[in-house]
Image (cartoon, rainbow, N blue to C red):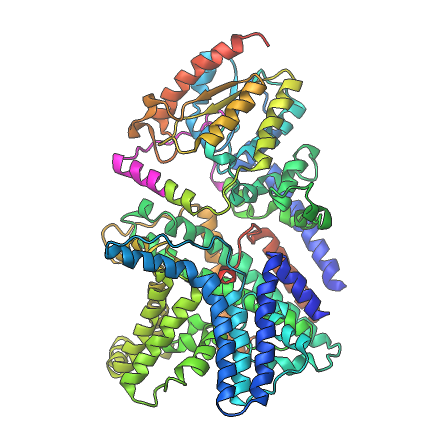
């Protein structure tokens, strides 16, 4: 009994300290996530994974569009995070446009994309908007209408979230680092400066193929499809233009199934889809730092994208 | 009650696979009875039937595709390309563990060390006892079966002891193993991205050694602790192997239940060291070859364990020379330095073959092995610095606890404060640290796959 009381007191106290540290951060990923979730007020918002963060030169696009832009891309995330981001963003601000960066492969089920949703947990108590997505950490892509789920509708994540400390799991070191080391971005854009060689490009391609071949139970993730449709629906409800962009990659990987699916979603919802994954203009390894574009590549890509976005902005709703 | 719980536990993975388990349970149960009642050659016959049934199940589910792959590869070399169908199914969880446990039952009955169990439900519980069903320890009937028949009264100290062991096991799994695993994946899944980074490969290898140990011994601690809470005492599976002073000692402290299984049922029946050093060396190599196969149907495992065996054989033949070398490297006055030197060398020796254990395929393993000794740039890529630091802190805690247990308390007790109040604060803090730093994702226990 004494252990339980002590545990609760310690947990609440540590949770409180972590809360102060997290929401008091003035730079770093934690600060940027909070900013994007609660304060971002730009006209154009980019969301997605590290590809959004590295490939979209936000200041250049802002200049070109003559609109304020913010890059809310988050390293290691997927459409699941973009859905949570859109929900949070639209709850306090109505931008003119949301640009969703999506890597076609990310539509496939990957455990890691659920694991990384831990970045949503600090917001779990105070923001209802992200709960649906955060709860998926516990259920993954289980079909919640299935007999199995009805027999055993237990979501372990909800139990873990009773702990205040758990909401800041794996964050204390980053928060401490954030106090001493300030990371500066250009409206969320964080360019990479190095350039790969032709040989390295091939190595990245080979290793990607290898990783893909090792994946068991490879299937399209229903939650990600739901997220994509959810983003579009939410934006439409608020009269926000939404654009899907597949930025350049080292090699066009996915099979046609994914492209057909994204095409059909974009078509049925009458939204623009810009696919640069097979674009020959970005074939050169000189535009890449690793699997992401480098500053030269992202600047070139962003200048082309900006022209396309300009046309979409000018279109009547 | 326990049997029902064990069945439900097993069926959480793939429910239909329980049929495979029940099949071997029924065969071994009757084999035990028949061996007891039979005389002369028939006793051996029933033992062979039981072993064939167990090895047969193991061969079909675990090794069939491996054999087919190798046959096709060999046939291909001869210009023949047979198209043998493969089995497209997931390996039943913990198959190698409960199969070996089941075999130890019939062997011990055959040897007359164990009376056959008349109650099939009790025998089924022996094979399926859920704390150790999927990843051991691989128990012996003499140690486990009789405990199911005994009355287990409430014992506060026993239960608290079990819970502490479970907590330490959880700590090892989520704070150390899974955190090291993140760095290890980065190195071993993408080795070519680290070309020339010698220190990265060494670091990856060391982290894998700690990951493997904490993952597996963490599970063992949880299994032993859970059983202890219920009043069942399971055998010790790990005794701080990385503090061993020789590779031979490591194997006496690592996965003890499997090592002793092979010693009792393979090495000694083959003659052990009784028939001379050369025959002993061959027997050792056979045991380690089989141990590699037990771990997985892949040449990487077989090679890894064959190297372990070769290391022991080398030690068998060059014990004097190795002793001479250590005498010259060590200090005659400073015993502590000697201990550190022996421990470090044993650890490094055991780590190198792990490159085969973890690598995704043979070419990757060879590339990693080559990179370990390519002292070109020596660069260290720490990847995500937070992951690296969390892992290092975890490993430091591991060594602090184990050094305390090994050299100071000389027991398995955790270093805890003496006062009851402080004990509560200490264990609450451990739980909070797990919540703050543990990896709570979908990572599986490595040994579940075996």
Q: Residue at x 63, y 80 (%)?
A: B145
Q: Is residue B165 visible?
A: no
Q: Residue at x 51, y 42 (%)?
A: A110
> Quadrant location of residue B170?
bottom right
Front residue of B218 and B56: B56
> Quadrant location of residue B207?
bottom left
- The mark total stands at 0
> Quadrant location of residue B74?
bottom left
Q: Residue at x 39, y 68 (%)?
A: B292
Rendering coords of residue A175 (x, y %): 54, 43
Q: Is residue B191 left or right of residue B157?
A: left
Front residue of A80 and B302: B302
Q: Height in image: A62 above or below B423?
A: above
Front residue of B373 and A101: A101
Image quadrant for the N terminus of chain A?
bottom right
Q: Residue at x 48, y 11 (%)?
A: A310
Image quadrant for the C terminus of chain A?
top right
Front residue of A55 and A153: A153
Q: Height in image: A131 above or below B185?
A: above
Reply yes or no: does residue A201 show up in magenta.
yes
| Residue at the bottom extreme of this rendering | B40
Rendering coords of residue B242 (x, y %): 43, 70
Reply yes or no: does residue A182 show up in magenta.
yes
Rendering coords of residue A274 (x, y %): 46, 20
Residue numbers of the magenta segment: A179-207
Rendering coords of residue B31 (x, y %): 57, 80
Q: Is residue A132 visible?
A: yes
């Amino acid at each position: 009994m004494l252990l339980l009381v002590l545990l609760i007191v310690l947990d609440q106290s540590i949770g409180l300290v972590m809360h102060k540290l997290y929401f008091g951060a003035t730079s770093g990923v934690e600060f940027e996530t909070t900013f994007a979730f609660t304060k971002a007020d730009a006209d154009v918002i980019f969301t997605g994974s590290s590809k959004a963060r590295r490939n979209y030169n936000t200041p250049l696009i802002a200049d070109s569009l003559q609109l304020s832009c913010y890059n809310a891309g988050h390293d290691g995330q997927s459409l699941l995070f973009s859905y949570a981001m859109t929900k949070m963003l639209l709850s306090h601000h109505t931008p003119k446009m949301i640009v969703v960066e999506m890597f076609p492969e990310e539509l496939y089920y990957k455990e890691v994309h659920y694991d990384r949703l831990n970045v949503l947990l600090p917001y779990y108590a105070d923001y209802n908007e992200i709960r649906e997505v955060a709860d998926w950490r516990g259920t993954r892509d289980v079909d919640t209408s299935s007999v199995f789920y009805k027999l055993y509708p237990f979501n372990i994540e909800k139990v873990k979230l009773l702990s205040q400390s758990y909401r800041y799991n794996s964050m204390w070191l980053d928060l401490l680092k954030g106090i001493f080391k300030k990371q500066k971005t250009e409206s969320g854009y964080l360019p990479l400066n190095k350039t790969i060689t032709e040989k390295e490009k091939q190595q990245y391609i080979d290793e990607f193929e290898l990783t893909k071949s090792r994946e068991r139970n490879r299937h399209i993730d229903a939650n990600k499809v739901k997220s994509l449709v959810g983003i579009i629906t939410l934006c439409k409800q608020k009269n926000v233009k939404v654009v899907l962009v597949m930025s350049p990659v080292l090699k066009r990987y996915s099979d046609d199934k994914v492209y057909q699916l994204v095409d059909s979603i974009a078509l049925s919802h009458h939204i623009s889809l810009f696919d640069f994954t097979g674009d020959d203009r970005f074939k050169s390894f000189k535009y890449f730092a690793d699997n992401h574009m480098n500053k030269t590549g992202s600047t070139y890509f962003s200048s082309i994208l900006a022209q396309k976005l300009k046309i979409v902005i000018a279109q009547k709703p | 009650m326990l049997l029902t719980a064990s069945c439900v536990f097993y069926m959480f993975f793939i429910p239909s696979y329980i049929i495979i388990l029940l099949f071997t349970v029924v065969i071994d149960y009757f084999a035990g009875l028949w061996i007891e009642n039979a005389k002369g050659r028939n006793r051996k016959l029933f033992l062979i039937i039981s072993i064939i049934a167990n090895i047969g199940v193991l061969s079909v589910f675990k090794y069939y595709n491996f054999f087919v792959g190798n046959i096709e590869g060999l046939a291909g070399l001869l210009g023949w390309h047979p198209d043998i169908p493969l089995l497209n199914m997931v390996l039943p969880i913990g198959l190698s563990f409960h199969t070996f446990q089941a075999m130890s039952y019939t062997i011990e009955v055959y040897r007359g060390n164990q009376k056959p169990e008349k109650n099939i439900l009790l025998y089924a519980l022996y094979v399926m006892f859920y704390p150790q069903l999927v990843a051991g320890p691989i128990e012996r009937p003499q140690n486990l079966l009789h405990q199911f028949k005994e009355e287990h009264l409430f014992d506060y100290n026993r239960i608290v002891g079990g819970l502490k062991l479970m907590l330490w096991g959880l700590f090892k799994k989520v704070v150390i193993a899974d955190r090291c695993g993140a760095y290890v994946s980065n190195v071993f899944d993408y080795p070519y991205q680290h070309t020339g980074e010698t220190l990265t490969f060494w670091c990856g290898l060391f982290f894998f050694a700690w990951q493997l140990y904490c993952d597996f011994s963490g599970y063992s601690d949880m299994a032993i602790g859970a059983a202890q809470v219920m009043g069942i005492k399971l055998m010790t599976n790990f005794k701080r192997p990385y503090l061993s002073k020789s590779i031979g000692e490591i194997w006496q402290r690592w996965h003890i239940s499997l090592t002793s299984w092979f010693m009792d049922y393979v090495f000694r029946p083959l003659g052990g060291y009784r028939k001379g050093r050369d025959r002993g060396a061959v027997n050792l190599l056979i045991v380690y070859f089989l141990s590699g196969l037990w771990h997985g149907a892949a040449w990487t495992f077989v090679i890894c364990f064959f190297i372990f065996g070769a290391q022991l054989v080398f030690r068998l033949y060059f014990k004097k020379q190795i002793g001479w070398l250590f005498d010259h490297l060590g200090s005659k006055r400073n015993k502590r330095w000697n201990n550190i030197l022996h421990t470090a060398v044993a650890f490094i020796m055991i780590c190198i073959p792990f490159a085969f254990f973890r690598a995704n395929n043979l070419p990757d393993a060879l590339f990693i092995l080559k990179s370990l000794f390519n002292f070109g740039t020596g660069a260290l890529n720490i990847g995500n610095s937070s992951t690296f630091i969390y892992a290092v802190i975890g490993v430091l805690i591991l060594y602090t606890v184990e050094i305390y247990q090994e050299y100071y308390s000389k027991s398995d007790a955790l270093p805890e404060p003496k006062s009851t109040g402080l004990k509560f604060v200490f264990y609450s803090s451990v739980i909070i640290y797990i919540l703050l730093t543990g990896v709570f994702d979908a990572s599986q226990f490595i040994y579940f796959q075996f």
